Amino acid sequence: MSAAPRVYVVDDHPDVRNALRLLLRSVAIEAKAYGSADEFLADFAPEPSQQTLLLLDVRMPGMSGMALLEQLRTQCPSLPVIMITGHGDIDMAVRAMKLGAMDFITKPFSAQGLLDRIQDVLRRVAEAGRSDLDSNSAASRLDQLTTREREVFDRIVAGQSNKAIAIDLGISVRTVESHRARLMDKLKAKTLVDLVLLAVEGKQARA
């Protein structure tokens, strides 16, 4: 019988750590929690025979989550990482993806939603190498968009408002909203961060 997956949680808030640890254990996922990046680095040892994943808070005292992610890309590039933040910073999401993060989740999130994202990452890692699978999947999903939807998509991820997009494309704000709703449904995206991550992955596939 294969070992249960192990998820490392690095977050400086004790209540968050405890809640995530209990949530993971409730679905038979082994969980180890740390209050800082330094605590994690002092204890972490790769487990080749066990599926592992890191849930990493972006903002922490001392070494930040982003700094830890950057260090891990050199020391342990095979460890899949999901970044968690209370601030939906688009530039931060793009940087995290370029450093190798597999997902970027903004608080607040539902317990089931988080578990679904964790299981999706574990499944993708088990099926194939991270970069090829993620990038090709993103490119394939983006190819489903119509020409107009792609024009709206590109402007959304560039940070334009619905009004600015409407003026730029010569259409009404209501039409922009309609395109936006359809493309988010096609791409199975729930937030602006999800769209940005897809844009980054799609560019990597065509690089």
Image: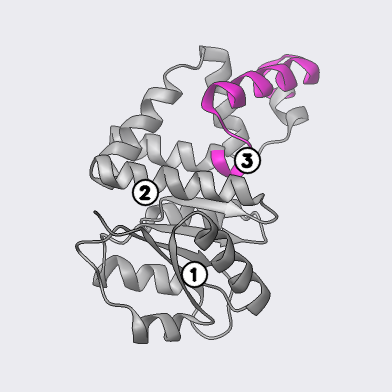
> What residue lies at 58% left-to-right and 60% top-to-bottom?
23
User: Residue 102: where, in percent of width, then height?
Assistant: 41, 50
Q: What element carries label 1?
A: strand
Lower position in the chain sequence, tag 1 or tag 3: 1
| Residue numbers of the magenta segment | 167-194
**Alpha carbon separation for disc pair 2 and 1:** 15 Å
Q: In which quarter of the image is the N terminus?
A: bottom left
- Amino acid beneath label 3: Leu
Q: Which mark is residue 192?
A: 3
Looking at the rendered image, the disc whose residue lies closer to the viewer, 1 or 3, is 1
Whether residue 193 appears in magenta in the rendering, the answer is: yes
Q: Could you say which quadrant of the image residue 177 lies in?
A: top right
The residue that label 1 is drawn on is 9
- Amino acid beneath label 2: Leu
**Alpha carbon separation for disc pair 3 and 2:** 23 Å
Label 2: few (<14), some (14–19) or many (≥20) C-alpha neighbours in 10 Å:
some
User: Residue 195: where, in percent of width, then height?
Assistant: 55, 37
Q: Residue 58 carries which label?
A: none
65 relative position to 46: left or right: right
The residue that label 2 is drawn on is 122
- Amino acid beneath label 1: Val
Q: Is mark 3 on a helix, strand or loop?
A: helix
Whether pointer 3 and pointer 2 mark residues with C-beta atoms closer than 8 Å, the reply is no
Q: Does 22 sit above or below residue 12?
A: above
25 relative position to 18: left or right: left
Label 1: few (<14), some (14–19) or many (≥20) C-alpha neighbours in 10 Å:
many
User: Residue 17: where, in percent of width, then height?
Assistant: 59, 72
Question: What coloring was used for the rendering?
Answer: one colour
Instruction: Give the camera-side residue of 12 and 147.
Output: 12
